[in-house]
Amino acid sequence: MATFNNAKLIELVKDITIAKLSSNNSVASDISGKDTAEFMQAIYDKLVELNNKDN
């Protein structure tokens, strides 16, 4: 299986985050911003882990 570079992983994180936020009726606030950042970091970390397993 092909491995992805960092730019592609970030693009995937962005796409996943947009999909999640689009399906959620959240309001912009400090708390939701922090939650979103934590969500994005968790997704990125998991994608990096899965990407490295393929090597």
Image (tube, rainbow, N blue to C red):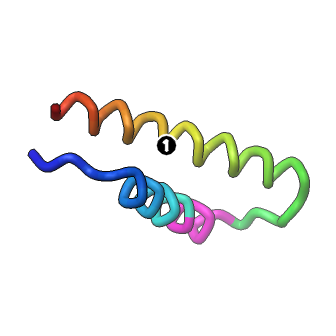
Q: State the SS at label 1.
A: helix
User: Picture coordinates of residue 23 (x, y %)?
Assistant: 57, 67
> Between residues 25 and 41, which one lies in front from this camera angle?
41
Residue at the (36%, 59%) spot, across then down = 8
21 inside magenta stretch = yes
Residue 33 falls in image quadrant: bottom right
Near mark 1 (Cα within 10 A), the count class, few <14, some 14-19 or many ≥20, is: some
Residue at the (59%, 71%) spot, across then down = 22
Q: Which residues are magenta?
A: 18-24
Q: Is residue 29 above or below residue 18?
A: above
Q: Main secondary structure of the magenta part?
A: helix
Residue at the (90%, 53%) spot, across then down = 30
Residue ranking furthest to the left: 1
> Between residues 52 and 43, which one lies in front from this camera angle?
52
51 inside magenta stretch = no
User: Picture coordinates of residue 46 (x, y %)?
Assistant: 42, 35
User: Picture coordinates of residue 5 (x, y %)?
Assistant: 32, 52
> Between residues 26 and 34, which one lies in front from this camera angle?
34
Picture quarter with the C terminus = top left
Q: Is residue 48 left or right of residue 16?
A: left
Residue ranking furthest to the right: 30
Q: Which residue lies under the disc numbered 1?
A: 43
Residue at the (27%, 39%) spot, across then down = 51
Q: Is residue 38 left or right of residue 51?
A: right
User: Picture coordinates of residue 21 (x, y %)?
Assistant: 62, 64
Residue type, numbered disc 1 = Ile
Q: Is residue 1 left or right of residue 33?
A: left
